[in-house]
Amino acid sequence: MPNKTFFWFFLPTGLAMILFIGLPIISTGIQSFYAQHDQVVKEVKKCDPFGCTVSIVVDNEETSKIREAKPLGKFNGFGTYTDRNHLAVEEIKKFWDETENFGAFVDQVTNLPFYKALIFTLTYCLFVTPNVLLLGFVIALSLNAVARKIRGPLIFGTILPMIVTPLVGSLVLFWMIDSQGIIGANIQNLMNDPYLSLKSSKTLTWITIIIYGIWHHSPFAFVVFYAALQTVPQEPIEAAIIDGASRFQRIKHIVLPHIYPVVTFVALISLMDNFRVFEPIIGFSAEGSAQSLSWLIYDNLVNEEVILFGSAAATSMMTIIGIAILLAPVLIRTWKEFKTAR
Amino acid sequence: MDYGLDTKSARLKTFNTIFIITWLLIACFPFIWTFWGSFKVRADFFSRSDWWYAISAFNTLIETGGKFTTNAYTQAWTEGEFWKASKNTIIVTVFVVSISLFLGTLGAYALSRSTEKYAFWILMAALIFRAMPHITLVSGYLFPFFELQIWGILPTTIVVLVAINQPFTLWLLYSFFKTVPKELDESALIDGCSYFQAFRHIIMPVMWPGVITAGLFSLMLAYNDFTVTALLLNQENHTMVPKIQSYLGTNQHEGNLMWAVSAVVSATAPLFMLVMFFQRQVISGLTAGAVKG
């Protein structure tokens, strides 16, 4: 296709992506170097018959004047990146000097908001992604073995958790697991502990959200693996059966190698999706004990008083860097393949 | 192609059946339970004293005189203004689907027919864009949108959702157009058609299966979106998903949690029906990128 024709065909979608994906990333980058203005304060002298008191109050007029003049905020350089709510450089130095052993140091650091969120996000990715691959694969194998006639409805039932939005999915589970729901109440009875609930412990909350993640994402892995299983050639499998290979050996040496590219694809997609985990935290109202990077950004953006654009932008930039690190191996591999293909 | 070589033992068959039934229970029961519970009063579905009330409808019987009640639905749809939210969702969904299909088919067609290097790079860039968490993009939008005073209205959200949706639509339709033989439009070009005419008269008639799949995914994205709609729309223009969340936030009123339950059912039911109807397309779409390479 000639370049000119290509240009006109691609222009609308390209423009949409540049304007609403490319530019926002740049806008986020710029915003991350600014912080909201400090409030202008003034001293007010108040006198009554018992004497005079000087109090400091916020000068709203002046503050809003500055805000209007420079809506982006004041220039802060990398200040936002290094402050307590983000990388917390100074705090970490302080902890390093003050704490006795390494364990205490790690304890202190993981209580800082950014690191807390980072650790939750990584834990979530680390536990959800492999389990999603495994469960999806097992369901695909298992469904592949049932009679063709009843597969349709079974597949429909299987993909339900995937097609609802994560907020709804997590709410539906939360209403069952909560102490007043069917599962929660029964576990309380079983454990004989009337105070046992999702919110009572951090570990329990994390486990619940991870289970939710596996529940929500496995159908996706299932669908892709199921489709890939249909393309596995029958002849090698038959040969293996004649040679006396067990079912497990057949899966390990024939099926898995055949669908290997698909496995990496699913792993990549689900890693990308898991890294942005956010809605389940709202659905499970787990803000207290589990915060993810995306949740931190959301929290800054719905801040009651002033929207913390700078802070949200800094976290966003670091999230984007995280995504880039995750994607790097794939991009490098594709680039190498592309170069050798030429 | 089964020659009866792959014999399964009875034990394996039983095990397999048990596994599938267990999994289906895990996958579907939460939805069935929520559907069931949405016809109860709050004291039953979120029972403090006994979870069995949700089944025996103890309080529902006392409060409403029947075992089932549709109070939660009527209140959420009228008082809770869920009708407005569903109206907004329909507007957003219809526009997002049609605009993203229009842009996506043109772009993906061009990408699939280009032999230049930049086509590869554009696809790679689209992959990176696809990986961006939506919330990071939203944090980029908010400030400029406030400044331009286009925050809070439906058109802005529609355009943003279209853009966010483009990378996936492009990839999906690209892999689909790759399966449409090149000779088809090349012969039209030789006959003197322009590229656009070839697209309009030769490709469009055969591309419907791919377009339906891409459309379904755009629909699911627009319908299900929370991050963008919650932060870019004002209260008045909220779509269904942020509306559900707002019912949760105002927990003080007795009725509101049940509003959320009935709203969840109301929002999910059309989606389930749609997927039941288009199940083949959904599955072919999910696998298009993976299996075809």
Image (cartoon, coloured by chain):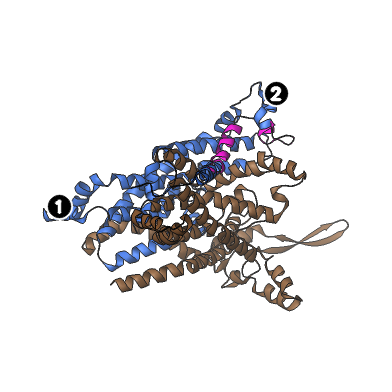
Viewer-side residue, B11 vs A103 = B11
Q: Chain of mark 1?
A: B
Residue annotated with mark 1: B188
Left or right: A246 as drawn, with respect to B46:
left
Q: Which chain is brown?
A: A
Q: Secondary structure at mark 1?
A: helix
Indicate the amino acid at tag 1.
Ala
Q: Residues within 10 Å of mark 1 (few under 14, many from 20)?
A: some
Viewer-side residue, A205 vs B6 = B6
Left or right: A183 as drawn, with respect to B272:
right
Q: Which chain is blue?
A: B
- Residue A127 sits in which quadrant? bottom right
Residue A54, horizontal then vertical, whole percent: 79, 63
Residue annotated with mark 2: B62
Res. A297 mark = none
Q: Earlier in the sequence, mark 2 or mark 1?
A: 2
- Residue A111 sits in which quadrant? bottom right
